[in-house]
Image: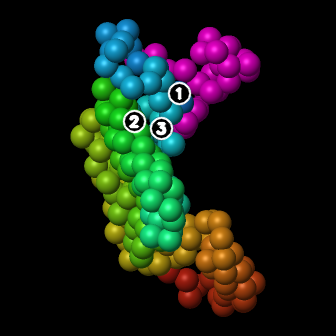
Amino acid sequence: MRKVCHAGAQACGGRGATRPPARDNNPRIAAPERLDGLSQKQTRVPDIMFVGSGVGINYDGGMHYDLRSIAEATTMEPNEADEALAAVRRAIVDDKRRDRDLWLRGLTVLPATSEDLYQPRGPDRLMGQVMEAIERTAGRDLSLQRSVLTRQPFVRERQRLVWSLFPGERGRRISQQLVRELQRPQGHVESCIIAL
């Protein structure tokens, strides 16, 4: 059985309450004693965990590896370029070690990138992969949830809704478009098709 420490819990060294919140989607996962010496770090924190499943996501944003520093390395002094490349390499190595540490703790943590989220149908694809992992590891049947991802009337609108929540200019622009569309009269209720 793995020990789950929640950020802020006194039992895990934090300053908050000793009782963890009822639903913590971002728990600190401690290594069991038998893994002493095998894990790079004693605890790891996946970005998002799907409660009750042992499946999660680690999100690597567009600037996660600071690739710009590699491009700029061509104009740097040799020792500065070496340090920029070494810093990116350290970040990649740490991510690989994090992935192994979480796997050793019995978790399935899928990597996700900004490209996964901004690509058309990307969030649906990622959630389909999460559902597959949950079905395989937790033995749950998510066929109903999976069927919602394929319902064509909702695909485009769900994609736009998800994108509208993202930070930055693109999210702001899509959010403003949705607000304008929702403020327009929709016609009669009888003309709407609702597929459940």
Of the numbered discs in the image, which one, if any, rests on residue 28? 1
Could you say which is closer to the camera, residue 192 or residue 20? 20
Amino acid identity at mark 1? Arg
Viewer-nearest residue: 100 or 92: 92
Q: Earlier in the sequence, mark 3 or mark 1?
A: 1
Q: Which mark is residue 46?
A: 3
Q: Position of residue 97 (x, y in %)?
A: 35, 35
Question: Label 2 to label 1, Cα distance in Å?
Answer: 12 Å
| Residue at the image position 63 percent from the left and 22 percent from the top | 20
Residue mark closest to the camera, 2 vs 1? 2
Q: Dividing the image into 4 quarters, which one contains the N terminus?
A: top left
Please report the residue visible at 39 percent of the width from the left and 26 percent of the height from the top. 40
Q: Position of residue 165 (x, y in %)?
A: 63, 65
Q: Position of residue 55 (x, y in %)?
A: 38, 39
Asked whether residue 65 is drawn in magenta, I would say no
Q: Amino acid at mark 3?
A: Pro
Compared with 177, 14 (above or below) is: above
Residue matched to label 2: 98
Mark 2 belongs to which amino acid?
Arg
Would you identify the image quadrant in which residue 153 lies?
bottom left
Any part of residue 63 in sight: yes
Q: Which residues are magenta?
A: 1-26
Tell me which residue sits at (62%, 27%) in the image.
Answer: 7
Q: Is residue 175 visible?
A: no
Secondary structure at numbered mark 3: loop
Earlier in the chain: of badge 2 and badge 1, it is 1
Q: Residues within 10 Å of mark 2 (few under 14, many from 20)?
A: many
Q: What secondary structure is found at the residue carrying circle 1?
A: strand
Query: Is the stretch drawn in magenta largely helix, strand or loop?
Result: loop
Whether tag 3 and tag 1 are in contact, CB under 8 A, the answer is: no
